[in-house]
């Protein structure tokens, strides 16, 4: 069981969107008086973040522009194009499904890693979760990959050569280089464009196979994360998952992504990653009853309550299933559904984020209207 701490500064937040730093909020404290963030597990599983503002962002699906809008809305990303962390001691949690349906997947992953590095120096933190599209890609399932994402993989592999395969240095800088590489590949035509696509497929396979460098990057992240009294996962947590062991599941999926399974058993991360009721695929809490034959509200609520009791948690936050009406809660606000389908490859809806302060949640919405073209 691994643990580490992140030094803290003071955070103060007033009331309207997104909440800015002031000296009048109930969280306002003198510099350095907040306790440090303590993280347990490898990958991170349990987080103590006393006095912090928490913001959660749902599925991003390869849309860098919408990602930036959501992070600016959350008050953690600068609006000047410099990709600077502005959240101070905020804890940012992204609930997975960065991959597929869009062309800027590695760029988004790079941006979040950069923000994570910056946040640590301010007393904040960035955590990512793996969703079903991350696990699908590590399994080699590329059904939902955008053509531009194959090209990004090919370009990124060439870019790695420039850094002599120094992964950490190259990966965190990719976000600042992605526009240039995209412009270069946009001028490809005819046979050369086909060659680049083939090269991109090969590159993606190499990057995301178990033990590949991008799969190992994803292996840094959990499938279930508990921050103070809140549980975060992509699809939904069930009592049997808790009984199996949250740290155990996170560790098994991480080892699988790193290609470290000693017995080579492909079923090892089944509990977390495969099957309709696995952690990353479960939609029990996210669909309306008309889509859930054989279930009643009281049955679902009972399962949810049992899960939260077993975790010692107040509420659960999930993504995975686009909510056409925006972020919403159910079952006495013990479940929050935050996937709004913001990617242009899904619903292209306006970004929304969930903010949690002093155990109270509220939705921060953009005033910008987006065209809605369901495709999921």
Image (cartoon, helix red, strand yellow):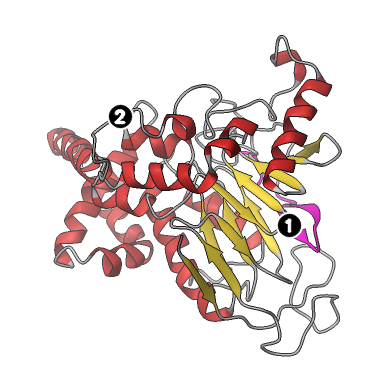
Q: Secondary structure at mark 2?
A: loop
Query: What is the residue that sits farthest to the top in this orientation?
Result: 294
The range drawn in magenta is 348-368
Query: Which numbered disc, 2 or 1, marks the residue that appears first in the sequence?
Result: 2
Visible residue check, residue 100: no
Report, in whole angstroms, how far the alpha carbon at label 2 lies from the one at label 1.
37 Å
Q: Quadrant of the C terminus?
A: top right
Magenta stretch: residue 354 in it? yes
- Residue density around tag 1, few if under 14, some if 14–19, many if 20 or more, within 10 Å: many
In the displayed structure, 276 sits above or below 234; it is above
- Horizontal relation, residue 214 to residue 356: left or right: left
In the displayed structure, 134 sits above or below 179; it is above
Which residue matches tag 2? 266
Residue 322 appears at what percent x and percent y?
Answer: 63, 32
Residue at the spot x=71%, y=78% of the render? 11
Which residue matches tag 1? 355
In the displayed structure, 69 sits above or below 30; it is above
In the displayed structure, 88 sits above or below 182; it is below
- Pick whichever, 71 or 271, lies toward us: 271
């Amino acid at each position: 069981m691994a643990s580490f701490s992140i030094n803290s500064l003071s955070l103060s937040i007033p009331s309207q969107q997104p909440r800015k730093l002031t000296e009048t909020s109930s969280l306002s404290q003198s510099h350095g008086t907040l306790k440090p963030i303590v993280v347990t597990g490898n990958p991170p599983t349990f987080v103590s973040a006393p006095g912090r503002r928490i913001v959660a962002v749902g599925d991003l699906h390869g849309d860098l522009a919408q990602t930036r809008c959501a992070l600016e809305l959350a008050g953690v990303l600068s609006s000047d194009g410099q990709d600077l962390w502005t959240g101070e001691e905020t804890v940012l949690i992204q609930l997975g499904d960065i991959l597929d349906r869009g062309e800027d997947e590695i760029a988004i992953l790079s941006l979040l890693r950069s923000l994570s590095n910056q946040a640590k120096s301010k007393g904040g933190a960035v955590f990512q979760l793996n969703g079903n599209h991350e696990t699908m890609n590590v399994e080699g399932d590329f059904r939902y990959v955008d053509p531009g994402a194959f090209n990004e993989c090919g370009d990124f592999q060439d870019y790695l050569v420039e850094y002599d395969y120094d992964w950490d240095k190259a990966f965190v800088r990719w976000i600042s280089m992605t526009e240039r590489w995209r412009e270069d590949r946009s001028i490809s035509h005819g046979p050369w464009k086909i060659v680049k696509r083939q090269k991109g497929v090969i590159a993606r396979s190499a990057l995301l196979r178990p033990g590949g460098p991008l799969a190992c990057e994803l292996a840094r992240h959990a499938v279930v994360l508990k921050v103070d009294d809140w549980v975060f996962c992509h699809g939904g947590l069930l009592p049997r998952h808790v009984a199996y062991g949250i740290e155990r599941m996170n560790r098994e999926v991480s080892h699988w992504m790193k290609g470290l399974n000693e017995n080579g058993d492909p079923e090892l991360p089944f509990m977390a990653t495969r099957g309709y009721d696995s952690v990353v695929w479960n939609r029990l809490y996210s669909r309306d009853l008309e889509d859930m034959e054989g279930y009643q509200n009281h049955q679902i609520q009972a399962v949810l309550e049992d899960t939260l009791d077993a975790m010692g948690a107040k509420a659960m936050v999930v993504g995975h299933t686009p909510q056409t009406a925006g972020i919403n809660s159910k079952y006495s606000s013990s479940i929050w559904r935050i996937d709004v389908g913001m990617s242009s490859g899904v619903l292209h809806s306006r970004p929304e984020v969930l903010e949690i302060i002093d155990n109270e949640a509220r939705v921060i919405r953009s005033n910008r209207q987006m065209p809605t073209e369901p495709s999921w």
